[in-house]
């Protein structure tokens, strides 16, 4: 790419600040850093009640209409997508855009990006933070699976570059496509921003605070952790008055995991005195809670060959607070935490987890965090890597 030519990137991100969703939080960090590193972004997002105060043009489109009937849904989505493309094509011309980047989820951003590549010829980079067709969290009908596979293939085929957030996710998604398509894939992980964390001075206390921030699903619950805590207290009841487990935002209508479900688990393991169930908090408050905790919990579903690396785990790491992972062996989360210097336990390791908690609560565990590895996930490092792919794509390199 000509060094004098400015990168003018259309960013299709349908979730943006001030929404509290993970994708909105991530793109909020990224776009600010893009600007700092010399990219001119133009953002397209869904209509919001509150506006994002970013120093870049932000255009809004109406959310996609849908239907529970597959044939009707496909027709409505196709009609809406064509209308959205016509609107966005004008923005591309007005702003002299030379690259399109779509940021999922939702995957509709990737669909729009692929359509715009076809109608405008502008180079296109798609982004997958989670699997779509291969998502183990969702049980889909035959028609829905067929529709999603068709759209996913369309996205990847029309992408000049496909960005994944982990190597495992890339392997899972690309396994069903021609091997030649692998040459246009790349991995850029989630990021944290050091300046986002508030300065915290911890007061000395006898309480050892475990915190979990984020929603649970029926496939992803705190049951194994609760079980290990109970077993530890049976072996040594003394720490019961010195433990506090904060579950912040664990119940959510979106995930269909209710407070009731959490209360049942708390009662099942007789942990009423040590568990606090707290509502969801703002992103800034979540960072403060991370800093205040003595240990943070990452919990993944017990899924074989799990492809997930939650953005929350990267935020945890940036806080500097020690982390425990409950995650399948070899998952992206397990690899990430292990390379940082933290312990993880799979779902067959309740016994080892129980013993580890015993020494952890006594503050007998020393942590030696791999700072060099952690810095790879800082927003300036991930942005530099992404911008390099932007430039290579404009140069026609793979």
Image (tube, rainbow, N blue to C red):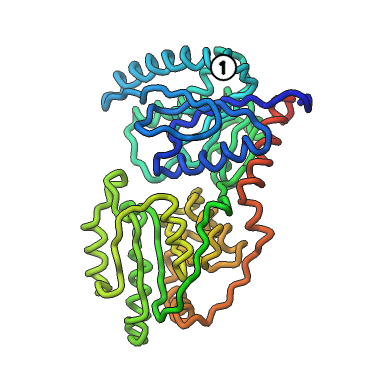
User: Residue at (42%, 64%) from the top-left corner?
Assistant: 347
User: Residue at (58%, 63%) from the top-left corner?
Assistant: 338
Q: Find residue 22 and report its image quarter.
A: top left
Q: Report how many numbered discs are placed on residues in the image.
A: 1
Quarter that holds the N terminus: top right
For disc 1, the neighbor class at 10 Å (few under 14, some 14 to 19, many from 20) is many
Q: Find residue 223 and report its image quarter.
A: bottom left
Q: Is residue 243 left or right of residue 344?
A: left
Q: Nearer the viewer, residue 54 or 69?
A: 54
Q: Nearer the viewer, residue 47 or 219?
A: 47
Residue carrying label 1: 92
- x, y (%) of residue 395? 74, 25
Quarter that holds the C terminus: top right
Q: Nearer the viewer, residue 225 or 175?
A: 225
Q: Is residue 65 left or right of residue 374?
A: left
Task: Label 1, secondary structure: give it.
Answer: helix
Residue furthest right in the image? 3
The relative height of residue 180 versus residue 351 in the rendered view (above or below) is above
User: Residue at (51%, 43%) from the top-left corner?
Assistant: 26
User: Residue at (55%, 64%) from the top-left corner?
Assistant: 320
The relative height of residue 287 versus residue 243 in the rendered view (above or below) is above
Q: Nearer the viewer, residue 126 or 244?
A: 244
- x, y (%) of residue 127? 55, 34
The relative height of residue 291 versus residue 311 in the rendered view (above or below) is below
Q: Is residue 282 left or right of residue 40?
A: left
- x, y (%) of residue 371? 66, 62
- x, y (%) of residue 305? 50, 52
């Amino acid at each position: 790419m000509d060094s004098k030519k400015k990168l003018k990137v259309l960013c299709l991100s349908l979730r943006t600040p001030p929404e509290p969703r993970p994708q909105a939080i991530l793109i909020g960090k990224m776009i600010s850093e893009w600007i700092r590193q010399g990219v001119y972004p133009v953002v397209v997002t869904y209509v919001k009640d509150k506006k994002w105060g970013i120093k870049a043009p932000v255009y809004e489109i109406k959310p996609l209409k849908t239907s529970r009937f597959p044939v009707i849904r496909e027709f409505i989505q196709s009609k809406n997508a064509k209308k959205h493309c016509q609107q966005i094509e004008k923005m591309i011309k007005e702003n002299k855009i030379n690259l399109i980047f779509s940021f999922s989820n939702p995957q509709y951003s990737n669909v729009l990006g692929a359509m715009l590549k076809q109608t405008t010829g502008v180079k296109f980079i798609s982004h997958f933070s989670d699997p779509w067709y291969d998502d183990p969290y969702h049980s889909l009908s035959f028609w829905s699976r067929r529709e999603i596979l068709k759209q996913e293939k369309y996205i990847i085929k029309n992408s000049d570059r496909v960005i994944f957030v982990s190597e495992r996710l890339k392997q899972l998604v690309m396994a069903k496509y021609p091997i030649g398509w692998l040459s246009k894939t790349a991995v850029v992980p989630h990021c944290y921003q050091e300046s986002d964390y508030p300065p915290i001075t911890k007061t000395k206390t006898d309480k050892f605070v475990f915190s979990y921030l984020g929603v649970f699903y029926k496939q992803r619950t705190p049951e194994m952790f609760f079980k290990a805590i109970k077993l530890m207290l049976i072996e040594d009841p003394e720490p019961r008055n010195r433990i506090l487990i904060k579950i912040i935002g664990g119940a959510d209508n979106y995930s269909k995991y209710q407070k009731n479900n959490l209360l049942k688990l708390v009662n099942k393991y007789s942990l009423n005195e040590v568990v606090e169930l707290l509502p969801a908090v703002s992103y800034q408050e979540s960072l403060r809670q991370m800093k205040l905790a003595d240990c943070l919990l990452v919990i993944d579903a017990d899924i074989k060959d799990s492809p997930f690396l939650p953005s929350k785990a990267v935020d945890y790491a940036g806080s500097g607070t020690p982390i425990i992972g409950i995650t399948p062996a070899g998952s992206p989360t397990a690899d990430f935490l292990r390379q940082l210097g933290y312990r993880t336990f799979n779902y067959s390791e309740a016994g080892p987890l129980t013993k580890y908690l015993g020494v952890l609560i006594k503050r007998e565990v020393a942590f030696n965090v791999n700072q060099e590895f952690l810095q790879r996930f800082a927003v300036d490092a991930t942005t530099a890597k992404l911008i390099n792919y932007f430039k290579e794509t404009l140069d026609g390199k793979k």
